Amino acid sequence: MKIIGGRHRGRKLQAPKGQTTRPTSARAREAVFNILSHGISGFTIVDVNVMDVFAGSGGLGFEALSRGARHCIFIEHKAATIKIISENAAQLHEQDSISLIKTDTRFLPPPSEDTNAPCGLFFLDPPYGKKFIEPTLNSLLQQNWLGPKAIGVVEYRAGEQISWPAGFEILQQKKYGAAEITLIRRND
């Protein structure tokens, strides 16, 4: 997997081995970042704090850093995956621009003072069909991880029925092969 835009464009990222991690396709990432850069009135990725929840290789978070985000909080529950994200950060010289949190993403603790939260942008790419989206979104809201009007990019299996919790509005939805991506905004 390669970063597709910004100062790290063309740089390769390591990904966890096996089928448990499903990186977002390059086509979908490019479309999402085009929307984030040009399609949401009043939003800019430059200098925003970002969360990459169910981070996998960290591709979405590193793409955001490459395009000017200030800091990215990567959240994963597997130690081996956290190690790969850390190695990717070192390869890109982004160690000072990231935080790593190993936890169950559905039950996030409140952010500590040094975590660069609240965030203005977040990516949520859980395993397909596991019904993690609603509890994770509720946890992000209840624990104050998201700033006012925070933008979210949520990926799930195309056609999967999602229960969107109160507190978010849907901005756009689009299918990319087997995936569907919905952009949402926190209502304040």
Image (cartoon, rainbow, N blue to C red):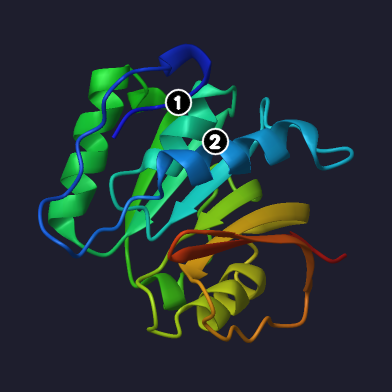
Q: Nearer the viewer, residue 33 or 101?
A: 33
Amino acid beneath label 2: Glu
Query: Is there any visible trace of residue 115 in the rendered image?
Result: no
Q: Tell me the quarter of the picture where residue 38 sits.
A: top right
From the viewer's perspective, tell me whether residue 56 is left or right of residue 50: left
Alpha-carbon distance for marks 1 and 2? 7 Å
Total number of numbered labels? 2
**Residue 74 seen in render:** yes
> Helix or strand or loop: what does disc 2 sit on?
helix
Left/right placement of residue 127 relative to residue 50 reads left
Disc 1: which residue: 4
Q: Identity of the amino acid at label 1?
A: Ile
Extreme residue in the front direction:
177
Give the quarter of the image for residue 84. top left
Given contact means CB atoms under 8 Å apart, are the residues at marks 1 and 2 in contact?
Answer: yes
Residue positioned 39% across, 82% down in the render: 129
Image quadrant assignment for residue 167: bottom right
Task: Give the residue number, with chain letter if any, for mark 2.
Answer: 30
Ranked by sequence position, the earlier of labels 1 and 2 is 1
